[in-house]
């Protein structure tokens, strides 16, 4: 869950699943992006899929790096 400065609250991710920041498996990341990219709109920073894509399955295995990148990409706080 994340709460933005504007008060928007978004629940995202799975409590039981593993993500790129957990396992660092580049093939699993690629498969995730392919599987979800066809059906999700990753341009809305307040959608659960967008948060999952850029925070949990981002370019880095480091959550904080992904978070900073997300904040810059969407200019949100």
Image: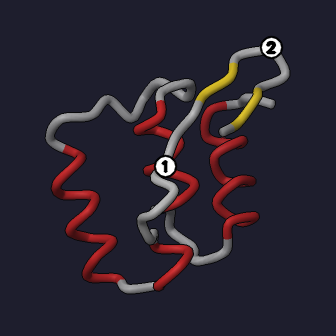
- Residue 4's place in the image compared with 54, above or below, is above
Q: Secondary structure at mark 2?
A: loop
Q: Give the mark nearer the N terminus: 2 vs 1.
A: 2
Q: Residues within 10 Å of mark 2 (few under 14, many from 20)?
A: few
Residue 32 x %, y %: 26, 62
User: In whole angstroms, how far apart are the C-alphas of marks 2 and 1?
Assistant: 21 Å
- Residue 54's place in the image compared with 24, above or below, is above
Instruction: Identify the residue position indicated by label 1 in the image.
Output: 13
Residue 13 x %, y %: 48, 49
- Residue 28's place in the image compared with 55, above or below, is below
Q: Residue at image x 44%, y 50%?
A: 53
Q: Are marks 2 and 1 in contact (CB under 8 Å)?
A: no
Q: Secondary structure at mark 1?
A: loop
Q: Residue at image x 53%, y 42%?
A: 51
Instruction: Identify the residue position indicated by label 2 in the image.
Output: 6
Give the position of the C terminus as an image quadrant: top right
Residue 68 x %, y %: 74, 53
Left/right of residue 25 with respect to residue 7 in the rendered view:
left
Q: Residue at image x 42%, y 29%?
A: 43
Q: Quadrant of residue 2?
A: top right
Q: Residues within 10 Å of mark 1 (few under 14, many from 20)?
A: some
């Amino acid at each position: 869950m994340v709460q933005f400065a504007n008060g928007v609250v978004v629940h995202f991710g799975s409590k039981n699943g593993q993500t790129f920041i957990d396992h660092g498996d580049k093939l699993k990341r690629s498969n995730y992006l392919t599987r979800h990219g066809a059906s999700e709109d990753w341009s809305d920073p307040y959608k659960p899929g967008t948060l999952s894509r850029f925070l949990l399955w981002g370019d880095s295995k480091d959550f904080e790096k992904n978070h900073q990148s997300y904040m810059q990409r969407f200019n949100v706080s």
